[in-house]
Amino acid sequence: MCGIFGYWDRGRRALADGVLQDMALKLVHRGPDDQGIHHHHERGAAVGNRRLSIIDIEGGHQPFVSDDGRIAVVQNGEIFNYIELAEMLRRDGVALDTNSDTEVILRLYEREGIDCLSRLNGMFAIAIDDAREDAMYLVRDRIGVKPLYLADDGERMVFGSEIKAILPAAGIERALAAVDVEAIHHYLSFNYVPPPWTIWKSVRHVMPGTWMRFSRTGVHTQAWWSLAAQREQDHRFEDWSAEFMSILDDATRIRLRADVPWGAFLSGGVDSSSIVALMARHVDRPVKTFCIGFADPLYDESPFAREAARRFGCDHTSEVAQLNMLDRWPQVLYHLDQPHGDASFMPTLRVSELAARHVKVVLTGDGGDELFAGYDKYPRYFSRPDAQTLPLPQFHRSYFDSISLFSPQAKQALYQPAVARWLADVDSFSAAAEPWFKEAEHFDRINQALYLDMQLLLSGNNLVKPDRMGMAVSLEARTPFLDWRMMEFAFRSRGHTKLRADDKKHWYKRAAAPLMGGDLAYRKKQMFTMPIGDWFRGASYDWLAATLGNSDLLNRLFRRELIEDMLLRHRDGSANFTRELRALAALALWAEQALA
């Protein structure tokens, strides 16, 4: 796990070395152990790395440079099948100087070019400076476990693992004029800024499953993997269960490859319990597991985590955390670089801090809910009598409406008149959701809904959480459920295997019950969150009102009287605007530090 950064200038203008050093400094939390930069001044190109040393501690220094000095590779992430790939290369006569997975990328690229990506099983963002082609490649893993952003003004492209490393190098001033109001418009629908947008006009994501090639004449973008390429198949449960457990077991096994201490987040839910149970099969010592608890039993998962830890013989560490973590919100937003209305980032930071005192790597259960219909919203929507009978375009729109934070009408009412006119024709559904739905029309309707959440909710919010909160304390998070084999298997599985009436993760839980016991497999899901809505009615009301009322950004965009009305109605209990107020507060707090 690392942070990567660099640039490509079409006019061969070199960035000052001090600028690259500043980019590296912005990412030091992602890679506190080592630093390397390959700067080709004459070509106006550089790739750099801040390293968190996980595999081949001594030999894994980046960038990796070809023997002739013409190719330089950096990566953020891990290639989990690097051992098998290295063995293949050696059988073919390729000499490897280290045991690093990044050298494997270099040697594969030398031999096969960019088509080598299909061989990689991992989580990665990669930059390749190739002087042979006089071009630079930026690559992102299949579903976006690892982040990668860029700013390209047509002359110079600047990239980095986090936005904070890009802005100064790209000449982007932290000012209201640089904020993307259309991105805020989409944020109000999704509760996060959906990719490829970011909060900054000039910064965009390298999209998951794509590579971008920057040359003197322009940019070429190509998808190298597509989840939508899958076709649903009929399965017998026994066959489905055997394949599911086989894939998950091997995905977990290869994610235990590390030369540093590792462990797992354990909540006692079915996803984390599945991973920990499989980890325990592959090691001869207790798995280190981590959980935080709260004094309020309504929000405390720690008893379930302790039960799971006892069952699997874990070396379990749990701490009771302060429930009200609002004082951590600015720190969370600093590491996010963007507003996110999801409150669970704060406890995720807290459990990451706990784990980082003991290990450098954790395995997590992220991805299980999106792949196998684990959220309450799925039975809530698909219990509607028209969910399966609406014409397809209306189904797409109605599902989008069911997950939206602010409706289009509510957004228009909230905006200042000039902003409302400006955004009147910008439809978040058409811009951000409909293209993904169109890719997924051959799936059944449950899988279409899951496909949208895989492409937007997962990469735009839910994978941001373990990456940024883990990297804030130099902790690497690995996600076995997002092994490419599991993702493809999940979308070859029909929707009825995932959701039946109100039974979420239907076949998954049946398959996992022998592994962990029915009490854990069928335990009711408990969200990892905090009672912010109650605080907004009581002890934190004055703080919230001041945060929203004093925000220059909010006052420029939104009608103050409507926000005040939401505050008052929420406080007196006549309405519940927890999610809306939380999203607005995150936007205000982000702006307070980002635009200072």
Image: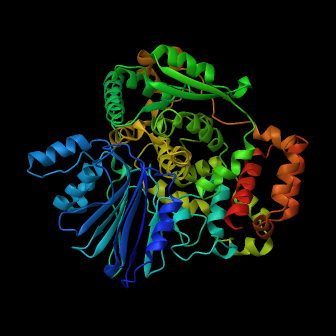
Colouring mode (rainbow / by chain / secondary structure / one colour) = rainbow
Q: Quadrant of residue 414?
A: bottom right
Residue 517 at least partly seen: no
User: Where is residue 44 shown, x and y percent of the image?
Assistant: 36, 79
- Vertical relation: 409 (above or below) 77: below
Looking at the image, the residue that sits furthest to the bottom is 11
Query: Quick check: 194 left or right of 14?
Result: right
Left/right of residue 59 with respect to residue 206 in the rendered view: left
Horizontal relation, residue 588 to residue 192: left or right: right
Q: Nearer the viewer, residue 324 or 354?
A: 354
Q: How many labels sit on residues?
A: 0
Say which residue appears at 60% left-offset and 24% top-offset: 524
| Above or below: residue 30 compared with residue 181 | above
Does residue 348 appear to the left or right of 288 in the view shown? right
Residue 297: image location, x then y, percent: 72, 23
Residue at screen point 71% across, 36% down:
530
Pick whichever, 85 or 460, lies toward us.
85
308 vs 373: above or below: above
Q: Position of residue 579 (x, y in %)?
A: 73, 47
Which residue shows up at 56% across the image and 24% down it? 317
Between 28 and 592, the residue placed more toward the observer is 28
From this viewpoint, is residue 348 visible? yes
Viewer-proximal residue among 137 and 187: 137
Residue 548 lies in quadrant? bottom right
Residue 596 location, x and y as percent? 72, 67
